[in-house]
Amino acid sequence: MSEEQELNTARDFASLGKKEEARKILLKLYESTNLNMNIKLNVILILLAVIDHVRENDQLVKLADEGIKISQKIGKVDVKLYLLTRKSHFLISKMAFLTHRKKNLMLSAAVFDWIDFSLEKDKKEYEYISAQREQLKKETDALEADIMKIIGNEKDHYLRGNIFMSLGESYGTKFLDTQTDLMVGGKIKTKLANIHLIKRWGLDKYLIFDRGSRKKINECAKKCIGFFERSITEFTAGDKKSDLAHAYYNLSIQYNTMYKFAEARKCLDLAEELAKATEEQYLLNQIIAFRKQVKDQNRHIRNYVEELGLD
């Protein structure tokens, strides 16, 4: 079987959700010497879809880096842009996991009126994680600057829409990560902040965040919504109804995370109308399921960290 045939077989496995089967073929191809650069780039792109995004973050960053170099060499600007946004997303996800670890190392100020560490090594790890997060923030800021510089020369509405949507999703993750990292408060404040009505009306921000922290959180939220609105503008201009439906659906998720339920419902209605027009049955099923979550108003939020055994 030729390398191109193996690639197509792996692509078929991936499209059927058979990630492990696809992964075995792709890793074998990836390790091949003198592999055609176009084939290797496609191998990397599919690997980014089948590798575990939670447990293999470092491998994903490495693959994205290599893909960026290859796409630069062969002049595929659109692929380079895509890989830059994926690398940024992977680094932001890494920041989020570091934040979770950082919080676990602390005898939290949200529970006690003092902070200390049970062991000296925990303190050192805490300091290391804090420095690492700052470095990752600088890297993601630099990546965003590169992306915006390149995309300024691109006219394709489909490409621009997808890049802006990816940046919006990244800022959605940053919004949650920034909240987790900056929250402070005593035992009583923390309990009050977790009451649903307090969160529903946004009063929790005044209990566990200072003014500077609220400003940073609001900046993330504003950029998240702004990038999604830009993606919607691009998809509308390009008459990309299917992509527009997905953009509205994903924006609804972000609004729901921010406790803006009226806006979330409005976006879901628009997504549903477009999904019906384009006969996107899978998306329609997602919309129906998510509408129940919006109606619940985040009273029963899933703990993905606990479910995945990452705590």
Image: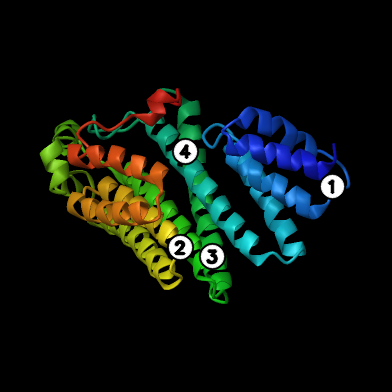
Mark in the foreground, 4 or 1? 1
The residue sitting at 25% across, 34% down in the picture is 110
Q: Quadrant of the C terminus?
A: top left
Rounded to the nearest angstrom, the CA distance separating label 4 from label 2 is 26 Å
Q: Earlier in the sequence, mark 4 or mark 3?
A: 4
Amino acid identity at mark 2: Phe
Which of the numbered marks, if any, corresponds to residue 98? 4
Instruction: Report whether 298 appears left or right of 229.
Output: left
Rounded to the nearest angstrom, the CA distance separating label 3 from label 2 is 9 Å
Q: For mark 2, what is the residue?
A: 164
Amino acid identity at mark 1: Leu
Which of the numbered marks, if any, corresponds to residue 71? none
Mark 3 burial class by Cα count in 10 Å: few <14, some 14-19, many 20+: some
Q: Earlier in the sequence, mark 3 or mark 2?
A: 3
Which of the numbered marks, if any, corresponds to residue 35? 1
Q: For mark 3, what is the residue?
A: 159
